[in-house]
Amino acid sequence: MAEVERTNFLKGFAIIAVVVIHTINYFMNRTLPDTSFWPVLITLDQLMRFSVPLFIALSGYALAQKYLKNRLNLNDFYFRRTTKLLPAYFIWTGIYYFSSPQTFPLWQILFLGKAEYHLYFVPMIFQAYLLFPLLFNLIKKIPWIFLIFSVIAQYFIFNYINQPGWTDQKQYILFMTWQLYFVLGIFLAVTKPHMMTKIATVIFPLGIIASIFTALAWWGKTRDVIWATRFTRGWVELYATGIIILSIAWVKKIKIQNIFYRTIVFLGVNSYQIFLGHVFFLRLLFVK
């Protein structure tokens, strides 16, 4: 099984989880005013929170896998990333803007993803691509040192951004908010960290259980579902890190290629287009 196919298989699960999270969001806020059922939906939301971290880790992983085998030409690298990301992004930005005009300045609409709430991902991942050549070379030279540095940095970053005034959208658009996952993806491509798989089997269940209980506790206290379920929480980071390590180790062992497998791979191959467009169709579905 080709490495790129394995990556697309995992991307397929990640895009399903993204759509589930956003469907839950629309369902709670537009269809289900009775909040008695919300704890179940919040629990499901937390189970899906591996989605964006896994996407980011797979981006770093796939790039590192490619350039371990091929010379990294900066001009070619940046040209490929730009032409792959931006045309579809600008098309969907236009669709979202003209179907539901925003009051933000045009430069924020175009370059900060303000046309719709999920479009922050594109300028954020573009920041990751700009830094990839530097991060790739550093991780190849000092993989464990750099990973430990990234973990420590993420702890302080989360403490800094989880302050009043830092909304989820203000947090999410910054690469520093997600840097550990991108670094981890590169790290898993350039090393053979068998010990980390054993660690992941511990932190994955611990993280998800704690993430669910703390999200429910925060929502019960504040009734702020967005802040209670956000990605930028330590327990979510622990859970997502565990599932990234386990999923990349697990997918290498898959040999069966049935219709389920091919369907998930198809979703993974088209995950970027699905990501850009799914909120538009959710809006049509849930409009009153």
Image (cartoon, grey):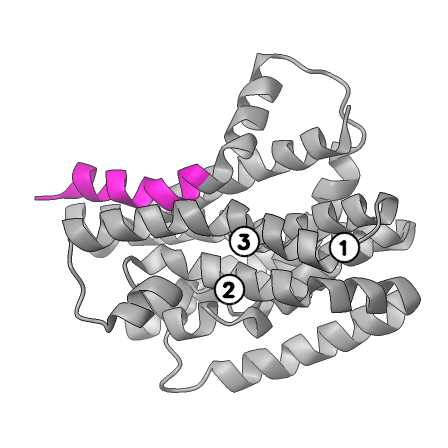
Which dot marks residue 279? none
Q: Is residue 39 above or below residue 264?
A: below
Q: Nearer the viewer, residue 39 or 251?
A: 251
Range covered by the magenta-colored residues: 273-288
Sequence-earlier tag: 2 or 1: 1
State the residue lying farthest toward the front.
75
Magenta stretch: residue 286 in it?
Answer: yes
Sequence-earlier tag: 3 or 2: 3
Q: Nearer the viewer, residue 42 or 171?
A: 171
Which amino acid does the dot numbered 3 rest on? Thr
Magenta stretch: residue 96 in it?
Answer: no
The location of residue 175, given as percent across then percent down, is: 56, 69
- Separation of residues labelled 1 and 3 (CA atoms): 14 Å
State the residue lying farthest toward the left.
288
Residue denoted by label 3: 82
Q: Nearer the viewer, residue 242 or 176?
A: 176
Which dot marks residue 124? 2
Q: Give the mark count.
A: 3
Mark 1 near mark 3, Cβ–Cβ under 8 Å?
no
Residue denoted by label 1: 73
Frontmost of labels 2 and 1 is 1
The location of residue 109, given as percent across then percent down, is: 29, 65
Q: Is residue 99 above or below residue 249?
A: below
Instruction: Classify the position of the N terminus by image quarter.
Output: top right
